[in-house]
Amino acid sequence: MVAGKGEAKIRRMTEADLQKVKEIDKELVGPHCCVSWPVRVEAHWWIYRGLPSFVAEIDGEVVGFVLGDIRGLEYGKDVGGWIDMMGVCSKHQGRGVGRMLVGAFCQECQKRGVKVSVVVVENDKRLVRFLESAGFQKGNLVSYEK
């Protein structure tokens, strides 16, 4: 499917997308991001590149991403899809791009017969609202710290 001018097109992520994905992530996380975070994006790509990660393009420019994988039996859960990182550059937020990216990831997981999970910081109200609006419900994982 070809997107019209100004419309988002979702496609599988490629190695050529890594730099733009890191730029979007840096824009969203800001100057307080962990120094190792860009390395994490690259590491995720090289470890899970055969698994469902997607980017959103508008007029040929990558404007968003979702990095995920399918793994299993962690935390007592069945094999499932996990959204590890996602982001949409600020000037394209509020246009449904994030929902389209999550939808593509969920659709891929559905084809493989697995449910999707994502772990978030509970007080990130904006992300929690987004995930709930995308149909996610609070699961049974709880974090303990000392």
Image (spheres, rainbow, N blue to C red):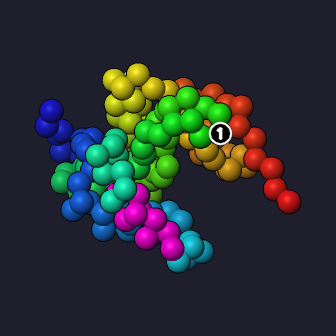
Q: Is residue 69 left or right of residue 139?
A: left
Q: Is residue 1 above or below residue 50?
A: above
Tell me which residue sits at (68%, 50%) in the image.
121
Tell me which residue sits at (51%, 74%) in the image.
36
Q: Is residue 100 left or right of residue 4?
A: right
**Picture quadrant of residue 11:** top left
Q: Residue 111: image x %, image y %?
A: 33, 23
Q: Magenta stretch: dominant SS? A: helix
Which residue does the numbered mark 1 point to in the structure image?
A: 75
Q: Quadrant of the N terminus?
A: top left
Q: Amino acid at mark 1?
A: Tyr
**Picture quadrant of residue 45:** bottom left
Report the span colored magenta.
Answer: 36-45
SS type, badge 1: helix
Q: Residue 132: image x %, image y %?
A: 60, 32
Q: Residues within 10 Å of mark 1 (few under 14, many from 20)?
A: few
Tell me which residue sits at (44%, 57%) in the image.
90
Query: Of 85 and 73, which appears nearest the observer?
Result: 73
Query: Of 29 and 15, which appears nearest the observer?
Result: 15
